[in-house]
Image (cartoon, rainbow, N blue to C red):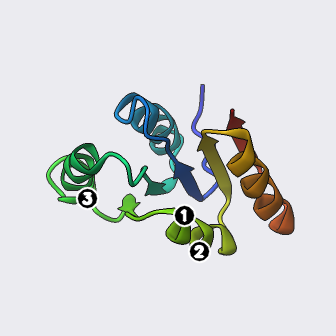
Amino acid sequence: LAPNPRGVALIIVPWNLPIQLTLNPLIDALAAGNVCILKPSEKCDNTTSLLTDLLTGGKYLDPRAVQVVNGGAEQATELLKHRVDVISYTGGGEVGRIVAQAAAKHLTPVLLEL
């Protein structure tokens, strides 16, 4: 296996299983050589705070490799307006449609786990 980086990976994560559903796609994206924008759920304040500190504090990862955007639907909607190289979304079908439509505007590859 050889890394095949795409560039910037946007990872949008749900509230259930916040650590596992954050770290699985994040590790895969980083191992492939991508940089990541992580949008965790606003419903998991403590877990989001912990992951933000661990992932962006510079102790475990290069702080340029992962950026965490905290907030709700407004922040996620704003992120989807920007061109990224791949999108990973785990969550419900209604928001999945919104993510797919946003990805289609730029022909961005998208992984939807609904």
Residue 58 percent location from the top left of the image = 18, 58
Q: How far apart are marks 3 and 2 (CA)?
A: 21 Å
State which mark lies toward you, 2 or 1: 1
State which mark lies toward you, 3 or 1: 1
* Element class at badge 1: helix
Up-down relation of residue 91 to residue 73 (above or below): above
Q: Are marks 3 and 2 in contact (CB under 8 Å)?
A: no
Task: Please count the marks in the image.
Answer: 3
**Callout 1: 10 Å neighbours few (<14), some, many (20+)?**
few
Q: Distance between the residues labelled 3 and 1?
A: 22 Å
Quickly name the residue at label 3.
Answer: 56
Q: Earlier in the sequence, mark 2 or mark 1?
A: 1
Q: In which quarter of the image is the N terminus?
A: top right
Q: Residue at x 46, y 38 (%)?
A: 31
Of residues 55 and 95, which is closer to you in this image?
A: 95
**Callout 2: 10 Å neighbours few (<14), some, many (20+)?**
few
Residue type at numbered disc 2: Glu
Which residue sits furthest left? 59
**Residue 108 visible in image:** no
Q: Which of marks 3 and 1 is nearer the N terminus?
A: 3
* Element class at badge 3: helix
**Residue 36 visible in image:** yes
Residue 78: mark: 2
* Element class at badge 2: helix
Q: Distance between the residues labelled 2 and 1?
A: 9 Å
Q: Which residue is drawn at 49% across and 44% down?
A: 13
Residue 73: mark: 1
Dividing the picture into quadrants, the one containing residue 103 is bottom right
109 left or right, relative to 79 = right
